[in-house]
Image (spheres, helix red, strand yellow):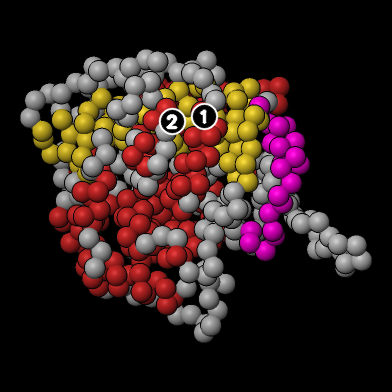
Amino acid sequence: MARVNRRLTVFGLVVALSVVGVRGAQTQRASKSLGTAAGAKAASGEAIVPFKIHVPDSVVADLKQRLQRARFADEIPEVGWDYGTNLAYLKELVTYWRDKYDWRAQERRLNQYDQFKTNIDGLDIHFIHQRSKVPNAKPLLLLNGWPSSIEEYTKVIGPLTDPAAHGGRATDAFHVVIPSMPGYGFSDKPRERGYNPERMAGVWVKLMARLGYTRYLTHGSDWGIAVATHLALKDPGHLAALHLAGCPGGLIGQPPSRPAGAPPPPPAPAPPAAPVSANLGYQEIQTTKPQTLGHGLSDSPLGLASWIIDKWQSWTDHDGDLEKVYTKDQLLTNVMIYWVTNSGASSARLYYESRHVDGRLLPTFFENFLPKLPEGHVNVPTGCGTFPSQYDRRDIPISTNTAAARKAAESRYNVVYLTISPHGGHFPALEQPQVWADDIRAFFRDRPL
């Protein structure tokens, strides 16, 4: 296995990248002001520059002031989450955010991981690259989506890179690469049209080659599923195996069988490749007018938290208490990554780019979520690790018919492995880290590089 290319370019003194002032003045340069890097800029050729997160004090102080002035919407009594983000929970979360949440502690926690920036196609790309100390560890690229971030994988970095210290086998070790997509987190924001999943996949092809990995593995959740699928089509000579958090075409939203004599079921749901629920309004907004929404997400931490937390509440497997699964610190750190980088609008634009193709608006978002496959198939060996609450469809029990699920997924992928976990949702590596890690190990264990 190829070792990492060690041509890391370090230009001497560690310098702070240019600092913008208050939140309202943040521009494309803002993401470069949120950390320190060795060297003047990652854009020097193909340099891979060490990076540490450090948000200016002015940004943290400005956030505190905005939270102190927060104005909440009214709510019809006793509606829970039916109309969207619950008022009582949001007030509780914002109070904790304002009075107890410690961003600097979270910053230190994130900075324990090895982070870098490198310039690809004119954009400085941020990524975690945590190498295992185990000889012959396998390179593993982890891809997330919206509204997630590098935080989604922080619970599993240790178990993946040092499995023996976490109850696993040393032979299951990985070198872990977790990038921030263009427009997300600490990566630069695209300044032109067209950064769709296919183009994002091209960025990761270049990143893995630049890191010196001639053969590698990948896992994707949410948008990472679409990007990883494109990656399998673009780079099959280097991508050895593909693992997805539920293969499209599989078993999401399949109704249960009906006992003899039972009344007929309601109309069947839409096909699994295009799951439909009563809560897809956010897709219509983000695929048509992300900039209109984006101004509110950029100006109001309350609005940003409400928009993001609604999805974490809807897509997580819990019994009505989100904090049985995540802590407030975990939820808020994910929100903070969007806030301090001012990436509410730039992240939402991925939806627009995916629905606008060749100058036309596709009828539905899902029509272009995944690529039109040459000869209808991904040939890279594929593992499908499915979790029952990946989408907002708790009213439709998930099918446990693995044969049917496998047959459906095989219409698109070279499925060599499929599991259905009893619990878990849309962000399984953070929600069910042990189950997720065991599934990753089991699939990739038999996938030679």
Residue sitting nearer the eye, 379 or 293: 379
Quadrant in which residue 357 is drawn: top right
Q: Is residue 81 at least partly visible in the picture?
A: yes
Residue 444: give its label: 1
Per the image, label 1 sits on a secondary structure element best described as helix
Question: Which comes before the other along the chain, label 1 or label 2?
Answer: 2
Please state which amino acid type lies under the numbered disc 2: Asp
Across and down, in percent, residue 19 comes to 16, 45
User: Outermost residue, right direction?
Assistant: 261
User: Outermost residue, left direction?
Assistant: 13
3D distance between C-alphas at marks 1 and 2: 8 Å
Please state which amino acid type lies under the numbered disc 1: Phe
Q: Is residue 181 at least partly visible in the picture?
A: no
Across and down, in percent, residue 407 comes to 75, 36
Q: Which residue is mark 2?
A: 172
132 vs 276: above or below: above
Quadrant in which residue 181 is drawn: top left
Which stretch is magenta? 393-414
**Residue appearing at x 30%, y 73% in the figure:** 95
**Residue appearing at x 52%, y 44% in the figure:** 222
Tell me the quarter of the image containing the N terminus: top left
Please give left or right for residue 163 compared with residue 368 in the image. Answer: left
Q: Is residue 172 magenta?
A: no
Circles 1 and 2: CB atoms closer than 8 Å: yes
Residue sitting nearer the eye, 50 or 169: 169
**Residue appearing at x 31%, y 19% in the figure:** 4
